[in-house]
Amino acid sequence: MWESVTTNTETVQITIDENSGIPIWLQLRNRLIYLITSGSYAVGDKLPTMREMAVELGINYNTVSKVYQDIERDGYIVSKRGRGTFVHDGYRADGESACNAADSLADSFIQQCRELGVPRRDIMELVERRLRATEG
């Protein structure tokens, strides 16, 4: 399912694939983190409310709430009572957090592999094998 979510000045594409086997909350979390670290959402941009996001994406409010709480804890957003939820740069203070789009993508891939139970060395071998396959 492809859905659009409107920010302050632009429409951002958020993809939720109900058939992917990846939990919806994780898909949304990874997409929002990517949009923030890639600059699609700038520091200070106001995000849609949790209710707006849930309605626009056709997903449960509690799912969106879980994602917002999770990424707020990691410093990607900050909630201001009565004003809304805004993109924050607190994640940059953590040296292990993604600082650009490629790092964010790699982090998401690693996290998904770990959730599948793939050992560290197998993740590295998988990447090497896929790189060789795309070069040939």
Image: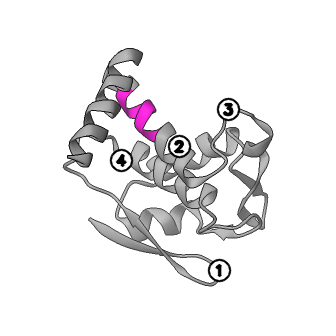
Residue 34 in sight: yes
- Label 3, label 1: how many angstroms apart (C-alpha)? 29 Å
- Label 2, label 3: how many angstroms apart (C-alpha)? 22 Å
The residue that label 2 is drawn on is 66
Along the line of sight, which residue is nearer the eye, 85 or 121?
121
Which is in the foreground here, disc 3 or disc 1? 3
Relative to 34, residue 120 above or below:
above
The residue that label 4 is drawn on is 24
Which is in the foreground here, disc 4 or disc 2? 4
Name which residue lies at 44% across and 52% down. Answer: 28
Name which residue lies at 26% across and 32% down. Answer: 129
Numbered mark located on residue 19 in the image: none
Numbered mark located on residue 96 in the image: 3
- Label 4, label 1: how many angstroms apart (C-alpha)? 24 Å
Residue 43 at x, y = what percent? 75, 63
- The answer to whether residue 53 is left or right of residue 43 is left
